Image (cartoon, rainbow, N blue to C red):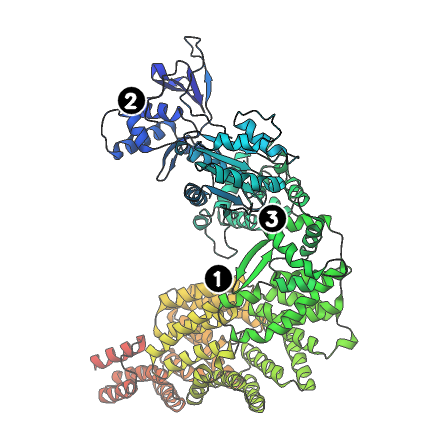
């Protein structure tokens, strides 16, 4: 390798460049390039060994013969060479770096005589290579190539296994080119795909090696020839002749200790010495909101799609919207390289959005690929025909039936759904085992159990060739109905998203079953039962729109015999909750929840009655009917006591604690909320019924801590509840935690913390179409604007928000927004308008029952009175005193602090300094150690001035 290449006498061409070695000249479009001597020598050395890895040591020996140079010098001249060639710009690729190995010239080279002489084509110093050209650029396979190469060097026999179109051949060819320098007798590539007769396998290998193949028994001659050779033998596409290839490869492996074998196949050869490497599809961007362009670019599937689309002439500007579309396409195609290339080739004709739409409607199996591709890879149809044709009759029948599963399925599900009088249950295990081995079914562990799935491309192919089977679809729907009913009771004890993944992995099958049940030829009765059983899983994932759609469809299908049934109860309950969170306090939501509760009461179903009381409780809270909500909470405690279990009691304590908190009964609220947060049974107040009641109790308890003079405890608990809600991966629960955490930030004076939380809240509400919450988010943004001195914008924002909330029947935060708007109006000097608004707000609280805010309203009323054109200091003092007294009676230390600050300021203006100091000192007494809020700082500052 260290011998310098013989000088060529002709001209070599690659890309837009012509190289004349004997003249040491390189031109681009006829113009000479200024290239240093060492850079030119490096170029000639690499071009003399195209598609081979030249180690850095060999390169330095060729370019600096007899000298010892630093590796940095080589890197410097390589960089200069690449810059001169424009390597890497506009998709051009000439020289690749293989980490830890060296450099490789990858551009195709053509040969021609120079302009001044007609001489024979240059003879490059090449080893005897019999390999296809490697791809100019491999996407996302560096780790696989490195791992397989290491395994191949160490163990000598590796099979790259994977489904058709995943890129096995491309990876094998790249590895062969990388490792050429390791093998004295080069590498030999044997493509077995075109063979229809297994007897021709050994003949093909003999011909590739240049040996005669006329003998009746060619194996001894082959083994004798390779026994002392050092070579790499690549056996590509073994699956259709695997019975012949497997023993032959094993024989070569044992007879020739210096021969390394690299096989590609859709199933393992399963012989001694073989090391299997399952080539995974390209990594795809996750299905999540907020995926940035920068993050998406790191995924190989998206990189490949972009490169192939642009190569076919498509112009794609990668922004957030286009990134989301391409990510969806890549996921739809399971990261399969061939499928991605075929889809990318359609973008120039259809555009990006239309290509995605076509794939969503139907995977097009007949889209054409490259003209030079092997016949089996010109279309997805051809690739799948090839794989399907290699299966036995039993395997084909089982595979067609497995296509009824959408997404993952378990072996238990397959055993219940697939067999009938034509498919023997006893043979199903063997068939699935074989289909996994042949890469037609993909295994994947989820939790402690193995699950299986068909790639979407495979499933689409099978659904086209398999006849409709109503009995199979009914078995599938019934299985998931029964599974949901049995598994539903365990979700209450599954708090984290990772643990719930075992349950949620069935969701695609549930959807497919519902589509069949309510479609033409489906079974409506099974569909109603399935919709009722599926509602908890949709609610547990906050899939509100989807839950509402199936609930409405099922209720339209319910006949007279099913009215008043448990199924109707569950469906009405789900519909009511989803309408409440997506559309607010509509009459339709009220009617659905009321109907569900009436059915539970009529059936004597106390557990569901308790859960429905919880839904009615939060419905009336959101409507601003706080006294009615308190009534449902008190009723829930009666039902829970009758049930007598800890979880029921914890749920009732949560409901009652939240109501007492909003009613301003802080001491009793603290008792109830601490019982719901810390007491027995709290771990089983689950999200199955729409949201996590324990978490809701926790964030309400944090607000109580703040109001009762424990701000540090409040902040710590708020962070804990938000973190736990996020870990659940349950958006409704997280929204509830965030919006109450925002109130603590605002009370604290932490505007940056409030903004961070409300931005997160808004993103969740947008992702789950929770309309009222979006309006709430904008309202909080308005309050933040007022606090930051942008009163005009803030007031208009809150006014708009309140109009939207009134229209949707959401009044839970009306009082807090009214208080913020009064502050904004005062900042704008609109005192009379603020006076009218504060009086309206006080009357609203007296009527609706959220007395929590009454001390603040009375205090704000006093501040308004002081600013009226005819100030009423005595009336203001009376309102401050009312606020102070009510705060003390309720046990709201924080409200007492605020009233004391305003009242002390009034006393100080009158010269009543001692009285003002006593008032502030009294308000500061009893606070928790190291308590720190904006109000406490203001009180201490006022004391200093006194």
Q: Is residue 836 above or below residue 344?
A: below
The residue wearing badge 1 is 763
Quadrant assignment for the C terminus? bottom left
Judged from the image, the secondary structure of the residue bearing numbered disc 1 is helix
- Residue 645 visible? The answer is yes
* Location of residue 694 in the rendering, given as x and y in whole percent from the top left corner: 48, 78
Counting residues from the N terminus, which is met first, the one under dot 2 or under dot 1? Answer: 2
Contact between marks 3 and 1 (CB within 8 A): the answer is: no
Spatial CA distance of label 2 from label 3 is 54 Å
- Residue 788 visible? The answer is no
The foreground one among 674 and 460 is 460
**Residue 96: quadrant of the picture:** top left
**Does residue 329 appear left or right of residue 703 in this picture?**
right
* Location of residue 295 in the rendering, given as x and y in whole percent from the top left corner: 44, 50
**Does residue 120 appear left or right of residue 525 in this picture?**
left
Question: Nearer the viewer's eye, disc 3 or disc 1?
Answer: 3
Quadrant assignment for the N terminus? top left
Circle 2 residues within 10 Å: few <14, some 14–19, many ≥20: few
The residue wearing badge 3 is 438
Q: Is residue 80 above or below residue 332?
A: above
The residue wearing badge 2 is 37
Say which residue appears at 56% left-offset and 56% top-offset: 443
Question: Nearer the viewer's eye, disc 2 or disc 3?
Answer: 3
* Location of residue 559 in the rendering, given as x and y in whole percent from the top left corner: 78, 73
Judged from the image, the secondary structure of the residue bearing numbered disc 3 is loop
The foreground one among 185 and 306 is 185
The foreground one among 399 and 430 is 430
The foreground one among 225 and 663 is 225
């Amino acid at each position: 390798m260290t011998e310098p290449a013989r000088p060529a006498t002709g001209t070599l061409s690659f890309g837009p460049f012509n190289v004349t070695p004997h003249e040491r000249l390189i031109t681009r479009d006829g113009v000479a390039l200024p290239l240093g001597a060492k850079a030119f020598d490096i170029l000639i050395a690499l071009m003399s060994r195209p598609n081979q890895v030249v180690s850095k040591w060999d390169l330095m020996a060729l370019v600096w013969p007899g000298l010892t140079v630093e590796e940095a010098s080589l890197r410097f001249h390589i960089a200069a060479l690449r810059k001169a060639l424009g390597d890497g710009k506009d998709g051009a690729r000439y020289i690749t770096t293989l980490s830890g190995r060296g450099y490789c010239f990858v551009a195709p080279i053509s040969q021609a005589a120079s302009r001044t002489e007609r001489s024979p084509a240059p003879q490059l110093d090449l080893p005897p290579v019999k390999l296809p050209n490697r791809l100019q650029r491999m996407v996302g396979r560096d780790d696989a190539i490195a791992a397989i190469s290491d395994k191949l060097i160490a163990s000598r026999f590796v099979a790259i296994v994977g489904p058709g179109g995943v890129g096995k051949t491309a990876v094998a060819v790249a590895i062969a080119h990388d490792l050429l320098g390791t093998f004295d007798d080069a590498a030999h590539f044997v493509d077995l795909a075109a063979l229809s007769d297994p007897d021709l396998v050994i003949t093909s290998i003999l011909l590739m090696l240049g040996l005669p193949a006329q003998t009746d028994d060619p194996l001894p001659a082959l083994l004798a020839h390779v026994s002392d050779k050092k070579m790499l033998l690549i056996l590509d596409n073994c699956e259709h002749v695997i019975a012949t290839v497997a023993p032959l490869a094993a024989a070569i492996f044992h007879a020739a200790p210096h021969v390394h074998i690299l096989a590609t196949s859709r199933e393992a050869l399963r012989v001694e010495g073989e090391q299997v490497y399952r080539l995974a599809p390209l990594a795809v961007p996750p299905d999540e909101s907020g995926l940035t362009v920068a993050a998406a670019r790191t995924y190989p599937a998206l990189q490949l799609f972009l490169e192939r689309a642009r190569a076919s002439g498509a112009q794609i500007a990668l922004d957030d919207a286009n990134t989301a579309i391409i990510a969806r396409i890549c996921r739809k195609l399971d990261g399969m390289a061939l499928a991605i290339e075929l889809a990318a080739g359609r973008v120039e004709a259809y555009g990006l959005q239309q290509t995605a739409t076509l794939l969503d409607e139907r995977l097009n199996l007949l889209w054409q690929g490259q003209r030079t591709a092997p016949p089996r890879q010109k279309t997805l149809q051809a690739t799948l025909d090839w794989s399907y044709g290699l299966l036995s009759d039993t395997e084909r029948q089982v595979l067609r039936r497995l296509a009824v599963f959408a997404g993952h399925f378990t072996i238990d599900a397959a055993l219940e759904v697939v067999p009938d009088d034509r498919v023997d249950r006893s043979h199903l295990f063997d068939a699935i085992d074989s289909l996994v081995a042949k890469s037609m079914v993909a295994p994947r562990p989820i939790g402690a159990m193995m699950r299986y799935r068909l790639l979407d491309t495979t499933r689409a192919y099978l659904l086209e060739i398999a006849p409709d089977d109503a009995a199979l679809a009914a078995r599938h729907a019934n299985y998931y109905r029964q599974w949901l009913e049995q598994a539903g009771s365990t979700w209450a004890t599954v708090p984290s998203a990772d643990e719930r993944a075992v349950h949620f992995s069935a969701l695609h099958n549930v959807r497919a079953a519902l589509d069949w049940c309510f479609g033409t030829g489906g079974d409506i009765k099974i569909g109603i039962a399935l919709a009722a059983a599926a509602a908890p899983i949709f609610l547990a994932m906050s899939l509100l729109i989807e839950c509402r759609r199936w609930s409405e469809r099922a209720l339209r299908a319910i006949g007279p015999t099913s009215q008043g049934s448990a199924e109707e109860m569950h469906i009405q309950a789900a519909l009511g909750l989803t309408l409440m969170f997506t559309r607010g306090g509509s009459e339709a939501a009220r009617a659905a929840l009321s109907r569900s509760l009436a059915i539970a009461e009529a059936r004597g179903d106390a557990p569901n009655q308790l859960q429905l009381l919880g839904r009615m409780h939060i419905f009336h809270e959101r409507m601003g009917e706080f006294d009615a909500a308190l009534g449902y909470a008190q009723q829930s405690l009666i039902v829970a006591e009758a049930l007598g279990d800890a979880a029921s009691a914890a749920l009732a304590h949560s409901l009652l604690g939240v109501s007492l908190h909003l009613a301003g009964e802080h001491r009793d609220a603290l008792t109830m909320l601490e019982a719901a947060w810390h007491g027995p049974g709290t771990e089983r107040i689950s999200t199955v019924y729409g949201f996590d009641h324990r978490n809701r109790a926790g964030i309400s308890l944090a607000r109580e801590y703040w109001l009762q003079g424990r701000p540090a405890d409040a902040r710590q608990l708020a962070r804990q509840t938000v973190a736990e809600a996020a870990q659940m991966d349950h958006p409704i629960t997280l929204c509830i935690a965030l919006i109450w955490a925002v109130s603590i930030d605002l009370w604290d004076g932490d505007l940056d913390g409030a903004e961070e939380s409300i931005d997160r809240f808004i993103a969740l509400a947008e992702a789950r179409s929770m309309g009222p919450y979006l309006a709430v988010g904008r309202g909080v943004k308005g309050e933040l604007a007022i606090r930051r001195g942008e009163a005009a914008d803030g007031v208009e924002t809150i006014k708009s928000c309140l109009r939207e909330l009134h229209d949707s029947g959401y009044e839970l935060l009306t009082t807090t927004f009214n208080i913020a708007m009064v502050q904004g109006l005062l900042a704008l000097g609109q005192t009379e308008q603020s006076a009218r608004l504060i009086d309206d707000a006080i009357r609203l609280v007296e009527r609706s029952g959220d007395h929590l805010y009454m001390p603040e309203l009375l205090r704000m009323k006093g501040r308004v009175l002081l600013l009226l054109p005819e100030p009423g200091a005595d009336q203001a003092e009376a309102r401050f005193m009312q606020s102070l007294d009510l705060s003390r009676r309720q046990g709201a230390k924080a409200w007492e602090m605020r009233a004391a600050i305003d009242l002390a300021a009034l006393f100080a203006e009158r010269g009543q300094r001692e009285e003002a100091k006593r008032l502030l000192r009294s308000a500061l007494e009893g606070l928790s150690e190291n308590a720190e809020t904006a109000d406490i700082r203001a009180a201490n500052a006022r004391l200093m001035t006194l």
